[in-house]
């Protein structure tokens, strides 16, 4: 009995891991390419005013950036110290961890094209609303660059200044080092957690249980909001959990609430934002994420209903198209890279420590 349960759990976990590995590697590679050309000084120049343009720039630039809930905090502090306005900083703080090229690719593989499109759209919308609310209702301050303030170093922090005079080859190496060592070292344990949790959900929870308590309606979305807000989980790690829940009967809207609230908020991040920008900004931050996540979740449910699509019928179809041999090789490569990243970053100070 115990052996059968253990074997079943391992089979489910391995299946999720094999389906996701190629897309995780692809997302990491593209994240490394983005890192090659990221320049915080340029970003700060477009985010320095207390206006809608700065908020839009911050949200737009944050959506594809490969920064997790940990890495976005020191990056946002750095941007604010370089002159970014509070509204733009808050917009960046929301759109960046809620989305990212790695999580978008993984959403396409494990979820479906609708979710892969709607997720970054929801992140962008939430970020713009939060930044605009901060500009309208937040406490105004004189935004002046300060070169004396420095953010503490950690394995997941941005280091855009270091590559100002690097050549293309050096930038590529630095980008891949960031993606497959620093970034993977930061989110690796959370990816493992997400994949294991997805396997446990797939094997252990009967479909009737998820449908009854988390199936559809506002109650299921509120429950996922309550679960997601204090949780520390990155966008990529939350994706397999959401996929497993949808496959068991959860509505796409409730899953989207979790995908937005989980990566964007956590207890440590709330404390940092309170210290950096004040308690009123924290209230705006949490209220906007909560209201926007619920509204976007309800809208997403209506999209599926209007289109006559059963989300369980199309969930994970892209991942299933990956040849088995490619999934197997990708899984082995990803395991090796994750272990290497953990070994090389274990002595670095952590943002969430």
Image (cartoon, rainbow, N blue to C red):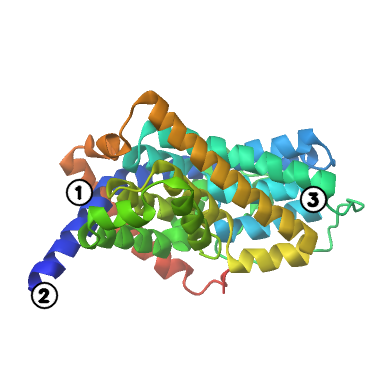
Q: Find disc 1 in the rendering and name its residue.
A: 328
Question: Which of the two discs, 3 and 1, sits closer to the camera?
Answer: 3
Helix, strand or loop for disc 3: helix
How far apart, in angstroms, are the residues tagged by discs 1 and 2?
Answer: 27 Å
Question: Which of the two discs, 1 and 2, sits closer to the camera?
Answer: 2
How far apart, in angstroms, are the residues tagged by discs 3 and 2?
Answer: 54 Å
Q: Write the residue at 35% across / 62% down.
A: 192
102 relative to 334, above or below: above
Q: Is residue 99 visible?
A: yes
Q: Residue furthest top?
A: 307
Q: Position of residue 28 (x, y in %)?
A: 43, 46
Q: Find disc 2 in the rendering and name its residue.
A: 2
The crowding category of the residue bearing disc 3, from other C-alpha atoms within 10 Å (few below 14, some 14 to 19, many at least 20), is many
Q: Position of residue 224 (x, y in %)?
A: 47, 56
Mark 3 / mark 1, whichever is N-terminal: 3
Mark 1 / mark 2, whichever is N-terminal: 2
Q: Is residue 152 visible?
A: no
Say how many tags the image has: 3
Question: Which of the two discs, 3 and 2, sits closer to the camera?
Answer: 2
Helix, strand or loop for disc 1: helix
Q: Nearer the viewer, residue 47 or 120?
A: 120
Mark 3 / mark 2, whichever is N-terminal: 2
- State left or right for residue 151 relative to residue 256: right
44 relative to 269, above or below: above
Q: Position of residue 92 (x, y in %)?
A: 67, 47
Q: Write the residue at 44% across / 46% down.
A: 217
Q: Find disc 3 in the rendering and name its residue.
A: 86
Q: Write the residue at 59% across / 59% down.
A: 265
Q: Nearer the viewer, residue 226 or 349?
A: 226
Q: Nearer the viewer, residue 141 or 230?
A: 230
Q: Position of residue 195 (x, y in %)?
A: 32, 58
């Amino acid at each position: 009995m115990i052996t059968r349960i253990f074997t079943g759990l391992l089979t489910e976990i391995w299946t999720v891991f094999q389906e996701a590995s190629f897309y995780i590697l692809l997302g990491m590679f593209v994240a490394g390419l983005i890192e090659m050309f990221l320049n915080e000084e340029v970003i700060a120049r477009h985010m320095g005013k207390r206006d809608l343009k700065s908020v839009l720039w911050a949200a737009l630039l944050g959506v594809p950036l490969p920064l997790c809930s940990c890495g976005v905090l020191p990056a946002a502090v750095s941007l604010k110290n370089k002159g970014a306005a509070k509204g733009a900083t808050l917009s960046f703080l929301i759109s960046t961890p809620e989305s990212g090229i790695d999580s978008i690719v993984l959403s396409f593989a494990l979820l479906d094209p609708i979710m892969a499109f709607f997720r970054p759209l929801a992140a962008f919308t939430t970020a713009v609303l939060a930044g605009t609310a901060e500009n309208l209702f937040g406490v105004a301050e004189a935004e002046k660059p300060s070169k004396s303030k420095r953010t503490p170093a950690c394995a997941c922090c941005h280091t855009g200044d270091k590559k100002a005079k690097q050549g293309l080859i050096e930038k590529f190496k630095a980008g891949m080092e960031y993606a497959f060592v620093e970034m993977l070292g930061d989110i690796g344990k959370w990816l493992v957690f997400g994949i294991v949790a997805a396997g446990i959900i797939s094997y252990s929870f009967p479909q009737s249980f998820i449908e009854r308590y988390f199936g559809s309606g506002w109650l299921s979305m509120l429950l996922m909001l309550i679960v997601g807000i204090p949780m520390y989980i990155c966008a990529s790690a939350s994706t397999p959990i959401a996929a497993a829940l949808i496959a068991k009967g959860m509505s796409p809207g409730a899953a989207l609430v979790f995908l937005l609230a989980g990566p964007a908020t956590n207890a440590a991040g709330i404390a940092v934002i309170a210290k950096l920008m004040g308690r009123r900004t924290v209230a705006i931050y949490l209220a906007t994420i909560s209201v926007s996540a619920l509204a976007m979740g309800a809208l997403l449910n209506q999209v599926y209903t209007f289109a006559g699509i059963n989300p369980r019928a199309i969930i994970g179809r892209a991942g299933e198209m990956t040849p088995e041999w490619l999934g197997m090789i990708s899984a082995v490569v990803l395991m090796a890279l994750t272990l290497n990243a953990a070994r090389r970053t274990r002595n670095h100070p952590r943002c969430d420590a």
